Image: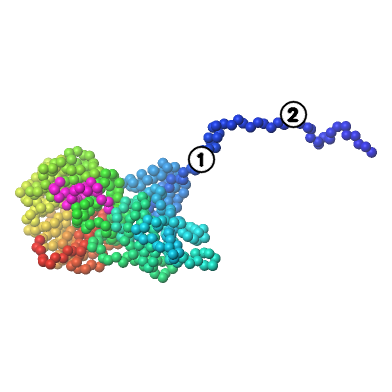
Amino acid sequence: MSRKRDKPYPYRHTPARISKRRRPWAPPSSEFDEIIDKPTIKPPPPPSLVVIGLPANCSVLELKSRFEIYGSISRIRIDKDGFGSVSYRTTESAEAAIAGSHEPSFGISIDSKKLQVVWATDPLVKWREGVTTVGEGKDKTLPSLSSSSSRLLRPVLPLRKHGRSSRLASAIVNPRSSNADGDGNSSLKSINLVIISIKVSQIISPVESRLHVRVDFVGSSITYIVLNQQDKQVKVNVSFTLDNSATRRRIMEVADEEEEQIWSWGAGTDGQLGTAKLQDEHLPQLLSLTSLPSISMLACGGAHVIALTSVGKVLTWGRGNSGQLGHGDILNTSLPKPVSFFDDYVITQASAGWSHSGFVSDSGCLFTCGNGSFGQLGHGDNMSQTSPAKVSYFVDKRVKMVACGMRHSLVLLAGNQVCGFGSGKRGQLGVSSDRTKSVNLPCIVSGLGEVGVVRISANGDHSAAISAKGELFSWGRGFCGGPDVQTPQCLPSSLSFREVTLGWNHALLLTVDGEVFKLGNTLDEQSEKQVDSSEALLENVPDFDGVKVLQIAAGAEHSAAVTESGEVKTWGWGEHGQLGLGNTDDQTNPQPVSLGSIDLGTKEINVYCGSGFTYVVRRKQQLSSSPTSS
């Protein structure tokens, strides 16, 4: 039976009425070709910062709370050894965080510990990736210390196999063990090294001090060379041996005893301790400045330090927000840095005030720098100076000594004349019986013309001088809450003094017989009885009965002394650990500071006090065959 199909089935597709045509290609465009030829530019990585000096108990949330106020954070991490990293989404936020960390009054701190924030643009990442030597195998010669062929390399073994980690300490491979097992894996053993002590023989800036180490020779002892950000070599005099412990390798310094030792402790958040760490230290910290000539003297100010070498060169470090370091900028420096301005001068004496500095050359010229808002620089204006400038008033005179206080300065001239300039609100200039607010040019201190001054001192709003007869003259803010003294007054006493040093509320006096007396209070307290400075009674400092003292020093509200037996004692305010006793307690009686063993008779000790920190310099005495009289 046939079936007719006179019409298509309804499910069949209807043929297209219009035929499909291929559209022609678009005409070639030169603009399109240019776009294709352009290289693909990857977006820059997010701006990252490295945070230095984190407390051991710091959490990520606590770190984030300090930095999120500057902008949106894309990544944050805390590493070991007080390091952390913060990545922002915009460069502007990172720049704001850098600027905030440099703010002198507040900065960025956690648990009262000021943090250092720098850009993460140095080769620190390479250090985290590992370090190895250049040569492998017994036939290859190990590079010498002077060779420039050794480089920072990735470890020989794959990072994926042994764990990449983000810790700062990386594995160092011994190139002498170049045998491989049957599977082709290297049998080189990795060890973790912990640096105990390093002696730097070249001064480097605080940012460059965040360095990594490359191994140039590995054996029973190792010598390192350090690379800074500019790939300049900084030699490090460190020798150490490796013990058999698989979990810890200690680096032991075996160098001979140094000719000179410099210790510092106390407030250090502005870098004034010279340790490259922005933190307070409650115990003495040993600094190593082996490349420098012997330090002849230190001057400690509000938060900066001046060091003079035996050849008359100048180094400064610490707070520099007013230009008091003399480096031509207003940056802090946490390591000693030479003042290039004095390359052609020989500086014999210096003084550090709260935020200004004074320098005396061997030719009797005076240079000042730092904060000049009260005229304390003596240049005839109230301008600050970031580089030392010669005080023209003394061009035809010979300056013997300068003393810088909180906002004023004193100068002792040849001929025993004393000049003062700066703030005189409390009478500390001694230039007039009337209250003088400030003077920006040196003026002669009245009442000292015939005295024969041999020594001057200034700190806070106090001024003092010692005559050739051992008399003490003081003026300025009254001690023990007494009234201010506008002109120098002699302290009635039968004692003969040879040294005076001033704090904010007290004065320390050293007699020619080695006795120590105090005037005022070393702690932040005032006597209930207000007396005139000329009538104030001297008090013996306790615990020095029968002990001869060779030198004294006074900070803002703490004091220090060196005894004939070579012992250093401190007392007073201890909030920042400036007493060096391992705590922050105040002490009313002198306490001994432990500085290690000392060979009696072979060391010379000097102590210096800043506002909230302390320095001690110990050096070997130059023994002569015949005694000399002083």
Q: How is the image coloured?
A: rainbow
Question: Camera-side residue: 181 or 163?
Answer: 181
* Magenta highlight on residue 63: no
The total number of labels drawn is: 2
Judge whether residue 295 can be spotted in this image: yes
x then y, percent, for residue 474: 12, 51
Compared to residue 325, the image places residue 598 above or below, namely: below
Question: Camera-side residue: 571 or 511?
Answer: 511
x then y, percent, for residue 312: 19, 52
Residue at 35 percent of width and 51 percent of height: 207
Residue extending farthest to the front is 139
**Residue located beneath label 2 in the image:** 18
Q: The residue under label 2 is which amino acid type? A: Ile
Q: The residue under label 1 is which amino acid type? A: Pro
Residue at 76 percent of width and 31 percent of height: 16
Q: Label 1 crowding class (10 Å Cα cut-off): few <14, some 14-19, many 20+? A: few
Per the rendered image, the range of residues in magenta is: 336-365
| Label 1 SS | loop
**Viewed as shown, does residue 79 lie left or right of 509?**
right
Indicate the quadrant containing the N terminus: top left, top right, bottom left or bottom right.
top right
Indicate the quadrant containing the C terminus: top left, top right, bottom left or bottom right.
bottom left
x then y, percent, for residue 473: 10, 51
Residue extending farthest to the left is 450
Residue at 51 percent of width and 58 percent of height: 160
**Residue located beneath label 1 in the image:** 39
